[in-house]
Image: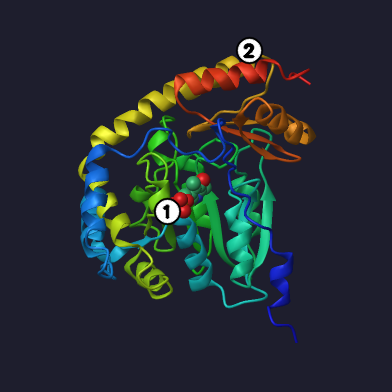
Amino acid sequence: MTLIRPDLDTLPAYVPGRTVPGAIKLASNEVAEPPHPVVLEAIARAAAGGNRYPDLGVVELTDRLAEVHDLAPERIAVGCGSVTLCQQLVQISCLGPGDEVLFAWRSFEAYPIVTRIGGAEVRTVGLDDGFRHDLDAMAAAITDRTRLVFVCSPNNPTGPAVRREEFVQFLRTVPADVLVALDEAYAEYVTDPDAVHGRSLLDEHPNLVVLRTFSKAYRLAGLRVGYALASAGIAAALRKVAPPFGVNSLAQAGAIAALEHREEILAGCADVVAERDRVAAALRDLGFTVPDNQANFVWLPLGDRAAEFATHCSERKVIVRGFQPDGVRVTVSTPQENDLLLDVASSFPDQAG
Ligand SMILES: *Cc1c(COP(=O)(O)O)cnc(C)c1O
């Protein structure tokens, strides 16, 4: 017997984006600008009631999300970030060893962690040559042990979005008793007209779950709010396994205010998209390979030079996210910060390498 379950020893540790004094942080896909002033006011008002428990049912925020997405409130589950909802998805679908969770690799680093916390087994399918999901191969990898499939679109960290047509085709092949989670953390940045939008597929596919977050385009990463859109049955199950009172009152109030002002807040995404395309083009001019990207970052498939590039940047006070031995993910930020990144990248030796 051991005090702690021994499989936790082999769990991959989450590597947080580093903060270095005086450096610019392009490592966690955050937005550089603080939350909208109206959101800050709502948070301050909520803080004054901090002696009370938050609304356990997250009723008002859920109702607002229901309006925004034109979906019954019973079909929405709010969580403390969509990462927590990923963990809840494993909890509601997997009983333990033998059950498998399938996802592309490389994809969101939280998927293997939440899978193994849930006692389930990881199954991965490699991305294709364009760093895209290979949905045919993923469909072929589903077995009678598969309980849950994560599809990340746009894919973190490589960038491409899944196309609507290929995703619909994929859904047709997935057995009805396998959950499919479409993680749309970067949906607000998608400009490809052929990209999938999960909401429109929910009614036809009762095993589909769409994950969204306030952490990226809404600029509320520190508040920890995300949500799932799904069938009423899935949403109810997600609520059952949620940490009690997990979505705190500041988070609820901030997210409600952000939704009220969402047009103004999301207008900022257009600037990020313009910068994304500028940064990608400039990096290609420098000799880097940069795949298509539909989110607020770019992927540099530097292979085993990933760590070297990340160190080169951090020594020059630009923090990026290296995933040795695959590549480096760089968050697209303000024009000034992006220019610094480009400047630092231009002095990386043999970048076309
Ligand atoms: C950033 C991100 C999330 C959001 O996580 P939160 O817990 O909502 O902050 C979810 N999925 C992916 C793929 C992400 O990159």
Q: Are marks 2 and 1 in contact (CB under 8 Å)?
A: no
Q: Quadrant of the N terminus?
A: bottom right
Residue nearer the viewer, 107 or 109: 109
Dot 2: within a 10 Å radius of its alpha carbon, few (fewer than 14), some, or many (20 or more) residues? few
Residue denoted by label 2: 285
Find out if the beta carbon at label 2 lies less than 8 Å from the nearest ligand 1 atom.
Answer: no
- The type of residue carrying mark 2 is Asp
Residue nearer the viewer, 212 or 9: 9
Dot 1: within a 10 Å radius of its alpha carbon, few (fewer than 14), some, or many (20 or more) residues? many
* x, y percent for residue 69: 27, 50
Q: Quadrant of the C terminus?
A: top right
SS category of the residue bearing label 1: strand
Q: Is residue 221 above or below residue 277?
A: below
Q: Is residue 137 above or below residue 317?
A: below
Find out if the beta carbon at label 1 lies less than 8 Å from the nearest ligand 1 atom.
Answer: yes
Residue denoted by label 1: 211
Residue 161 is at least partly visible in this image: yes
- The type of residue carrying mark 1 is Leu
